[in-house]
Structure formats: C-alpha cells, structure tokens
Image: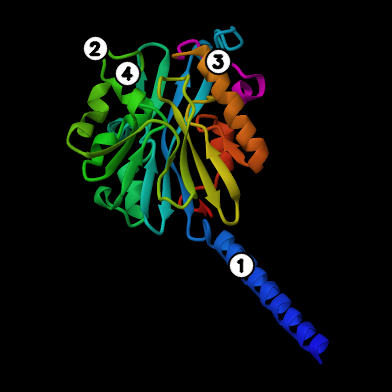
C-alpha cells in the first residue's frame, strides 16, 4: 500500500512538472510568434542620384571615371507602440524640379515624389511619426529631418557632436537637421532597442561617419532584415569590402563590416544595401511592405 501511494505521488509530481514545462514552452512559442507580428517595413522613394564619376565610393580606384546611379530611400517602420522613420532622404525641395537638379558638374539629383506625400498615402502626417532616426547625418539622409519637429529624434551622440562642429565635416549640412535643437532628442551611445521588445534595434556601425549606425528589424514573416545605411553604398562594395574615399575611419569601417556580417550570418538576416538600385528595386514597391 505504501509503495502504491509513493508511486501515485511521484506520478502526480512528474505530470505537474511536465505540464509546467509544456506551459512554459507554449508561452515562449507564443511570445516568439508575437514578436514582430504587427511590424511592417515600408520603403519610400526619397530620391535618386546619378554620378558622372563614382570614384568617391572606393578608395582603391575600382569606380574611377565610371558613371553610376544610387537610390536614396527612406523607411517607415510601423510598430504597435508607434511609427519610426529611418533616414529622411534628399529633401522634398528637389521635387520642385521635374527634370531634376544638377549639383555642380558631376551629380544629378531627382525626387519623383515627396516624402510627405508618401506618408499621407499611409494615413500619416509628420506629427504621427513617433521617432525619427538616422543612419548618419549626411545631407542625403537628413534632407527632410526638419519636417518632424514633434517627433522624438534618436541620434548617436558622437554623430551629432561631429556634425555640428565648426566647420562641419564634408557631406554635412547642419541646416537640414537644425530642428534637433528644439525637438525632443534621445541621444544614444551604442546599440539601442527602439520599442523595448527587441524587434527594432539600432546597431552601432561607425566608420563611414563617426557615429554611423544600421537598423535591425525582426519581422514575423520575412525574418531578420538589416538596413545598411552607408555601411555599403553598392552591392559590389559589400562583396569586395570596398571603403569609400571620404569615410571618417577606414579601420572602423572594416570592423563594422565584420561585426554586421557576423550578425547577418548568425541570424540569417537579409541585408539591404540602401543606396544600391537593385536592392531598392527588390523591396516591395510602395505602398506594399515587408512584415
């Protein structure tokens, strides 16, 4: 009788433990399924640039005297806790010229549709954008920044300090992001979890500029996606680890490439080279989205 009672107690405890483990596993699976469930990534056309000489995009001469094009996208990330705008493009002012605008003798810029018009088609006004963040503060990424004075600006501390120096570094136009002075600003020093749930993370990737960074998204259907900023400008830069001539630090650039590529490998992520026209065209055509 005693042995039967002991066996009964052991079986009940074993069943209780098994039930707890199953419940825990179910909770983890549910949490994993929920992560990124309502996350959407929209790719907006925020301009194009045609170069008569692409030499600046490699310090080892592969593009010298070769003509080429780059895309200048912006990205809207919709999350249950708010809306993030990643990079703000060339600037809607360039849309006023239907035939585009020459910048000196070597670069032609065009903006076919304004950022604000694209946001409107998503049912968004500037005041509906919760956060604005930048891969870096070069003028082709900060062109529309001042349209969002009511958003919280997430800015790398080192990037801002370098960008507002006198004189500013090449490629920086402080007038394009002057609203940071009055906007609510979140200064960050490294990686940053935007919504606090691991689905949208800014990753430090210095080198192109002092505080350059990339954006990592954990989407439910599409998996991990990383937006490159200017870690790379072209697919061939990524393939051959080419470093632009004007980067702030060659050593930091290569170290950042190594870090991000390791993350890509470990997470099986899709890395989007933001400026590459083929990568831009491969993303869902606005207003379609990745989720």
Query: Which one is in front in this view, the residue at disc 1 or the one at disc 3?
Result: 1
Name which residue lies at 33% across and 41% down: 132
Mark 1 burial class by Cα count in 10 Å: few <14, some 14-19, many 20+: few
The foreground one among 57 and 38 is 38
Report x, y in % for residue 281: 56, 39
Relative to 196, does residue 74 appear above or below in the rendering?
above
Residue 54 visible here? no
Q: To which residue does mark 1 refer?
A: 24
Q: Residue 162 carries which label?
A: 4
Name the N-terminal-most of marks 3 and 2.
2
Name which residue lies at 77% across and 83% down: 6
Distance from the alpha carbon under mark 4 to that under mark 1: 48 Å
Distance from the alpha carbon under mark 3 to that under mark 4: 20 Å
Name which residue lies at 61% across and 36% down: 263
Is 198 left, or right, of 265 in this rendering?
left
Residue 244 belongs to magenta span? yes
Mark 4 and mark 1 in contact? Answer it, CB < 8 Å: no
Name the N-terminal-most of marks 2 and 1.
1
Distance from the alpha carbon under mark 3 to that under mark 2: 26 Å
- Range of the magenta residues? 235-247
Residue 179 belongs to magenta span? no
Name the N-terminal-most of marks 4 and 1.
1
């Amino acid at each position: 009788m005693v042995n039967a009672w002991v066996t009964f107690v052991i079986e009940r405890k074993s069943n209780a433990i098994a039930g707890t483990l199953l419940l825990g596993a179910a909770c983890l699976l549910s949490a994993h399924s929920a992560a990124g469930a309502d996350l959407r990534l929209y790719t907006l056309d925020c301009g194009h640039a045609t170069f008569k000489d692409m030499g600046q995009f490699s310090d080892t001469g592969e593009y010298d005297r070769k003509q080429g094009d780059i895309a200048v996208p912006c990205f809207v990330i919709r999350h249950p806790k708010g809306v993030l705008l990643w990079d703000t493009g060339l600037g809607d002012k360039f849309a006023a010229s239907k035939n585009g605008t020459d910048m000196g003798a070597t670069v032609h810029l065009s903006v076919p549709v304004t950022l604000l018009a694209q946001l409107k088609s998503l049912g968004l006004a500037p005041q509906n954008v919760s956060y604005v963040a930048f891969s870096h503060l070069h003028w082709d990424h900060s062109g529309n920044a001042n349209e969002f004075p009511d958003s919280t600006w997430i800015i790398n501390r080192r990037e801002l300090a370098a960008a507002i120096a006198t004189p500013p570094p090449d490629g920086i136009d402080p007038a394009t992001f002057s609203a940071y002075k009055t906007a609510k600003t979140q200064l960050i020093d490294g990686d940053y979890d935007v919504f606090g749930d691991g689905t949208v993370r800014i990753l430090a990737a210095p080198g192109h500029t002092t505080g350059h960074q990339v954006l990592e998204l954990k989407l439910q259907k599409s998996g991990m996606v990383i937006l490159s900023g200017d870690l790379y400008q072209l697919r061939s830069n990524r393939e051959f680890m080419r470093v632009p001539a004007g980067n702030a630090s060659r050593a930091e650039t290569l170290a950042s490439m190594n870090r991000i590529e390791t993350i890509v490998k470990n997470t099986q992520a899709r890395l989007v080279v933001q400026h590459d026209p083929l990568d831009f065209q491969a993303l869902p055509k606005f207003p379609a989205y990745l989720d």
